[in-house]
Amino acid sequence: MASSNTYKLRCSIPGHEMDVRGLTAALFPEGAFVSVSRDRTGRVWEPNASPDRAFTERHCMSGHSNFVSCVCIIPPSEIYPRGLIATGGNDNNICVFSLDKPEPIFILQGHKNTVCTLSSGKFGTLLSGSWDTTAKVWHNEKCMMTLQGHSAAVWAVVIFPEQGLMLSGSADKTIRLWKAGRCEKTFTGHEDCVRGLAVINNNEFFSCSNDTSIRRWLLTGECVQVYYSHTNYIYSLAVFPNCEDFISTGEDRSLRVWRSGECTQTIRLPAQSVWCCCILPNGDIVVGASDGIIRVFTEAEDRVASAEDIQAFEDELSKATIDPKTGDLGDIKVEDLPGREHLDEPGNRDGQTRLIKDGEKVEAYQWSVSDGRWIKIGDVVGGSNQQTSKSVIYEGKEYDYVFTIDVNEGGPSMKLPYNVSDDPWLTAHNFLQKNDLSPMFLDQVANFIIENTKGHVLGQATPAGMDPFTGGARYIPGSSDNGPDLGADPFTGSGRYIPGSDVHSSAPGGVADPFTGGGAYSSAALRQISTNIYFPKTDGVTFEQANSTQIIAKIKELNNNAPQEHRLSEDILECLERLLVSVCAPNTEPPPNMQQINSLWKASHWPEDIVFPVLDILRLAVRHPQVNECLCGEAEGIQLCNHLLSMMRPEGRPANQMLALRTLCNCFSGRHGRSLLMAQRESVLSRAADLASVSNKNIHIALATLVLNYAACLYNHADLEAKAQCLSVASRALETVQDKEAVFRLLVALGTTVASDQTARDLALSLGVNSQISKYSSVSDPAKVGECCQLVLKELQ
């Protein structure tokens, strides 16, 4: 069989509806592989004998309630002679499938957050890693041990089957070696999240990271080699059977083939995130990406795709858009770019990138050694990376610029990283020394830096009190005592009906902050403003609307019709009425007393079919400092929380579910309530997330607000597990929520969670949040949805 030593497209398989997040070669049928996706399915693909050299779907598996993020094969056993397929998902579960049933034969439960990595060993052992910061060892459908020690999400795990050793890689930037459940060694060196691990042999392994590097390690702890070629996060690795060469994929739209320690081939794909890869027994490479398409590449000439299919792939690639801020293309000065005639000159190496100017457009081309030609890989959109504050990653570090310097015509180019805070002469001196170049070039290199960074200096910070729109005192959420009217929606400023709202509410006029409701928000006034007014949000959002008269009238009506054993006494009714007046007018009425608060607590245990108006009073009451302290304090807080969670059962009444959610949101208005809900976060958000499937927009708005309030409390806190749950619940809710107000609040929650937290951003990207929310970026009614979405997407770049 002829081989070209260069990988070319074999086939493209549009087999999934959403991102392909995991791949693994299958043991059966021969030459098959398994894929898993955000579309919640796993699929087995086997090669067919058709002229298109493609694969046929043999088996489809479903069992997860949310998207599937990883997959591995459990080797054959006496019970399962063809082996099993294990998949991990965002529902915190591991589903295990046979090859002849579409549903799981069993489900492993125990992780408290997304299961994002799996590895199998001998004798049916399965190792899993999760965002809950743990790895777990499973055998015979049971968790045998939990590996604890990482301080952040465990993104990668792998088993050394011969030695009984296990490795885990984490967002805490470390790799841990485990034996018999005990951490034997910690490997440090990566400067960002460790995303992938791959066994080389019995003594060595590879790791890849968000720091754009791949490292080769000895089990004894030494890092023996570092590989650089990727320009963005690296997500996955796979090793060839020769235990030396390997492949890698990442966020720079590429699959890279490494031979003898060098990147010998770069294959660009028409998708930003190339999430996963695997190598088939015949040497073919399979990759999965964010566009939902599986692509197979081969060295064997008799398996290469037809000329028509290759042309279709290249056409798709040429239509891709490339953001220069990724740093993959170096610094771009459009006016200095050559024209199309530059493509007449051959490239120096496979994968070399060349930019040309075609009228007002900038196009990117990549040199193919095997084809002896330049292949278009996309159109460059947006400004130069010299005109943006986005940092460029080079050798794992961030720089304002990374220049490409060609010293000798035809020789290898050199990278010159530079920050605007650096001395250009010192940077030039260090560059010459590092590359063993003559000091005579000092002036030339320094002047090159100065010339290409003109106008880019460290600017002065905007005064803290300055409003970027008016020049006046800037609004800081939570800093002003001039809040919205009680009747105004805290996000829209409108008098939009919410059950129990004040019928006299009216929308204030003028241009408004979308959170304070200081007026009717107008997009036109802010369209040219790049300042982010939506997030991070650091104060809680509450449900203030009330019509006291209607609430009390409803309680009395229900009480008159209630069975004798459930009727409230006149004293309790009077206490409820006085308490409601007190909490709705805290500045003019005396504070609630203990008799009133106890009466409210007793009444809140009315039968579920009539309790809803009492829950409405509870919702309003917990905003009052005295009630918040009494009901949310250490003694009673757990009881209150459990009572509200019982109202939120999926089979419960929608009115009670909604009001329980709103009560939890309002608990955030006091420090005792915040402490209670942060301590009970896991159970509260887990129960709340189940209500995303209820078809009720008011419940969805309340759920979105609860997630937002948690995000606000977690802002500037390095609690990865809590932020991961917020991201997970928000992502899950966005799959079903339709109401634009609920969507907006979820977008603000996402933005607040990832703002100023690189690890949270990575979590969001791994969830595929960017592709999930992109459809909202063009929403213009209301405009705040589209504008907020665009800002979240920008934050995730």
Image (cartoon, grey):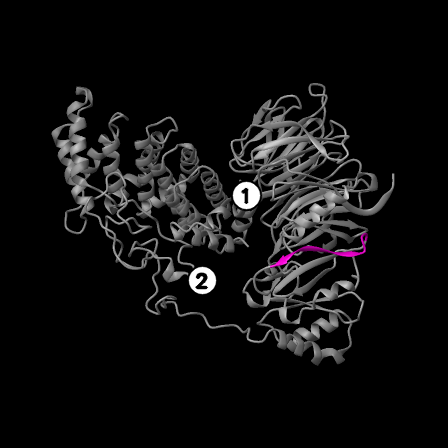
Q: Nearer the viewer, residue 438 or 579?
A: 438
* Residue assigned mark 1: 767
* Residue assigned mark 2: 530
Q: Is residue 463 above or below residue 280?
A: below
Q: Secondary structure at mark 1?
A: loop
**Dots 2 and 1: beta carbons under 8 Å?**
no
Task: Say few, some or many: other residues with alpha carbon within 10 Å of mark 2 (under 14 / 14 to 19 / 20 or more).
Answer: few
Q: Nearer the viewer, residue 213 or 750?
A: 750
Inter-mark Cα distance, 2 to 1 = 26 Å
Q: Hey, which quadrant is residue 385 in on the image? A: bottom right
Residue 293 belongs to the span the image colors magenta: no
- Whether residue 593 is visible: no
> Which stretch appears magenta?
370-380
Q: Secondary structure at mark 2?
A: loop
The residue type indicated by label 1 comes to Leu
Q: Hey, which quadrant is residue 50 in on the image? A: top right
Residue at the image point whose x is 40% and y is 50% from the top? 712
Q: Is residue 558 above or below residue 732?
A: above
Residue 379 belongs to the span the image colors magenta: yes
In which quadrant is the N terminus drawn? top right
Pick out the residue farthest to the right.
1
- Taking the image as shown, residue 15 lies to the left or right of residue 110, namely right
Expressed as whole percent of the image width and height from the top left, the position of residue 149 reads 58, 43
Q: Nearer the viewer, residue 98 or 507?
A: 507
Expressed as whole percent of the image width and height from the top left, the position of residue 156 reads 63, 42
Task: Say few, some or many: other residues with alpha carbon within 10 Å of mark 1 (under 14 / 14 to 19 / 20 or more).
Answer: many
The numbered mark at residue 636 is none
- Taking the image as shown, residue 536 lies to the left or right of residue 390, namely left
- Taking the image as shown, residue 748 lies to the left or right of residue 331, namely left
The residue type indicated by label 2 comes to Ser
